[in-house]
């Protein structure tokens, strides 16, 4: 939630933080290396909160899966290395 200055000449919001306009809901994110901001209604802000939480949960699941894959790949490399050493010893 943000309070903003309106940039109108003579408006007290430019000098006095307590006179700023708002409460505005703002969604800010990076896209193609640029910062994008969008003002939202209270209803849209609630929807965005749910979308953000779902995105966080998805990223956590992807990180968990990648860690599992790395562990499996490391195990396969260790088995392969041990097998190669045993073959050379024979």
Image (cartoon, grey):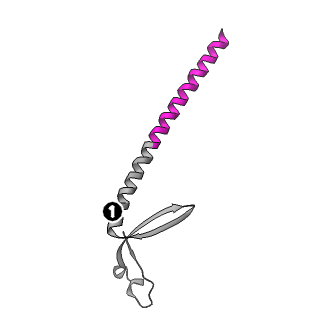
Q: Is residue 30 above or below residue 83?
A: below
Q: Is residue 72 above or below residue 86?
A: below
- Label 1: how many residues lie within 10 Å, few (<14), some (14-19) or many (20+)? few
Residue appearing at x 63%, y 16% in the figure: 85
Say which quadrant the C terminus sits in.
Answer: top right
Q: Is residue 87 above or below residue 25?
A: above
- Reply yes or no: does residue 68 show up in magenta: yes
In the image, the segment drawn in magenta is 62-90
x and y percentages locating residue 17 in the rendered image: 37, 79
Residue appearing at x 57%, y 61% in the figure: 33
x and y percentages locating residue 80 in the rendered image: 60, 21
Q: Main secondary structure of the magenta part?
A: helix
Q: Which residue is mark 1?
A: 46
x and y percentages locating residue 54 in the rendered image: 38, 52
Residue 73 horizontal side relative to residue 27, left or right: right
The image quadrant of residue 48 is bottom left
x and y percentages locating residue 70 in the rendered image: 52, 34
In front of the other: 50 or 11: 50
């Amino acid at each position: 939630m943000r309070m903003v200055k309106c940039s109108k000449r003579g408006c007290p919001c430019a000098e006095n933080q307590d006179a700023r306009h708002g409460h505005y809901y703002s969604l800010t994110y990076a896209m193609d290396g640029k910062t994008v901001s969008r003002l939202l209604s209270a209803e849209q802000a609630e929807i965005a909160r749910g979308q953000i939480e779902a995105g966080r949960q998805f990223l956590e699941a992807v990180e968990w899966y990648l860690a599992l894959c790395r562990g499996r790949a490391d195990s396969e490399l260790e088995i392969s290395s041990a097998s190669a050493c045993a073959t050379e010893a024979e």
